[in-house]
Image (spheres, grey):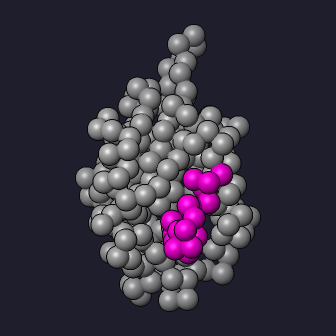
Amino acid sequence: MSIGFYFDMSRCTGCRACQIACKDKNRLEVGTIYRNAHTFSVGSFPEVKCYSYSASCNHCESPACMAACPTGAIDKREDGAVILDREVCKGDGACVEACPYGVPKLWEDGKAGKCDSCYLIREAGGTPACVAACPNRALDFGEVEELKKKYGDALVSDIAVLPSSDKTKPNVYINAKETATETGFTEVDW
């Protein structure tokens, strides 16, 4: 079994409610974020298009962060969630360097942390904080096969702002806007 996130780009307004909910749930220090919402523009005036993308851990089939961790602090649960045990982490930053998505973050205490798919909330019957907080229901989470059945075959894991999914095989499924495949994008700084 594998778990993952679904993201509907046509519903996301870039409000960052998901990012704030994640930060609050994880009690993250200033400057540390596990879920990042970004807005990108493509084209030039008068033909400018934009889209938003909300990114966190993709709970990859072949997590580069786990392979790089020298202490075994990162493990893949039976349900597919990639978990980092901060008690075991020695803070060498190998996971931060290895992840092509920039997911693990080093805290001020020198240890790494990352999205854990809110596995404790899920075990209690809830949904990840980011999914629950999204006012437009642009995010969903669940078993990969169920997400594919629910949202259809047009989902992608590769868009222009993400690295190729070939090596890590991320479990993120995106209902992407056509503009998300265009190169030459610029991040919009709010």
Looking at the image, the residue that sits furthest to the left is: 166
Q: For the point 66% across and 42% down, which residue is it? A: 135
Question: Would you say residue 157 is visible in this rendering?
Answer: no
Is 16 placed left or right of 143 in the picture? right
Q: Position of residue 50 (x, y in %)?
A: 55, 27
Is 79 placed left or right of 51 in the picture? left
Question: Would you say residue 168 is visible in this rendering?
Answer: yes
Looking at the image, the residue that sits furthest to the front is: 125
Is 48 placed left or right of 4 in the picture? right
| Nearer the observer, 89 or 12 | 12
Q: Position of residue 165 (x, y in %)?
A: 31, 51
Residue 138 drawn above or below residue 31: above
User: Which residues lie in the magenta part?
Assistant: 115-133
Q: Split into 4 quadrants, where in the image is the N terminus?
A: bottom left
Q: For the point 38% across and 31% down, which residue is it? A: 181
Q: Position of residue 55 (x, y in %)?
A: 51, 51
Residue 45 drawn above or below residue 71: above
Q: Which quadrant would residue 158 be assigned to in this image?
A: top left
* Residue 121 part of the magenta-drawn span: yes
Q: Split into 4 quadrants, where in the image is the C terminus?
A: top right
Q: For the point 47% across and 60% down, which residue is it? A: 57
Q: Position of residue 82 (x, y in %)?
A: 42, 71
* Residue 167 part of the magenta-drawn span: no
| Nearer the observer, 28 or 90 | 28
Residue 157 drawn above or below residue 144: above
Looking at the image, the residue that sits furthest to the right is: 30
Q: For the point 37% across and 71% down, which residue is it? A: 79
Is 108 placed left or right of 91 in the picture? right
